[in-house]
Amino acid sequence: MARKSLTNAGGIIESSFSPGKYCLEMSSVIYDKLWRFDHQALPKDLISWGMAVEDSSAPHVVRLTIQDYPFASDGLLLWDAIKKWVSDYVNHYFYLYKVAIYE
């Protein structure tokens, strides 16, 4: 009964705790005004939290102040993997674009 009335889509909890159809619009405005990718992405966030310091010789360009902090160590591994994939993807298609333009 609780699942049907409380936690279902459009149920009491969803209608009480979320802005409904305006959620994406509100999030867009808030992120546009307050969130900066260059300051709040994982490496910079860890630095601002005091969990890491900049270190150009470190594998992730940051050195963790607490080595056994799973969120940071695993997060940086994921961050680097995603960064590499996105960089390879963009470089590949940018190269194809340049080739197509100059042919």
Image: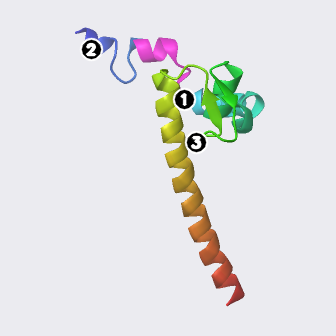
Q: Which residue is mark 1?
A: 21
- Amino acid at the residue labelled 1: Lys
Residue depicted at 60% across the width and 62% down the height: 90
Q: Is residue 9 left or right of residue 27?
A: left
Residue 74 in view: yes
Residue depicted at 44% across the width and 17% down the height: 14
16 within the magenta span? yes
Q: Is residue 21 left or right of residue 56?
A: left
As drawn, the label of residue 3 is: 2
Q: Secondary structure at mark 1?
A: helix
**Earlier residue among tags 2 and 3:** 2
Measure the alpha-carbon separation of dots 2 and 3. 47 Å
Measure the alpha-carbon separation of dots 1 and 2. 22 Å
- Pair 1/2: label in front: 2
The image quadrant of residue 6 is: top left
The answer to which of 40 and 53 lies nearer the viewer is 53
Label 2 crowd bin: few (<14), some (14–19), many (20+), radius 10 Å: few
Q: Which residue is mark 3?
A: 59
Residue depicted at 59% across the width and 33% down the height: 24
- Pair 2/3: label in front: 3
- Amino acid at the residue labelled 2: Arg
Boundaries of the magenta span: 13-20
Label 1 crowd bin: few (<14), some (14–19), many (20+), radius 10 Å: few
As drawn, the label of residue 36 is: none
**Earlier residue among tags 3 and 1:** 1
Q: Secondary structure at mark 3?
A: loop
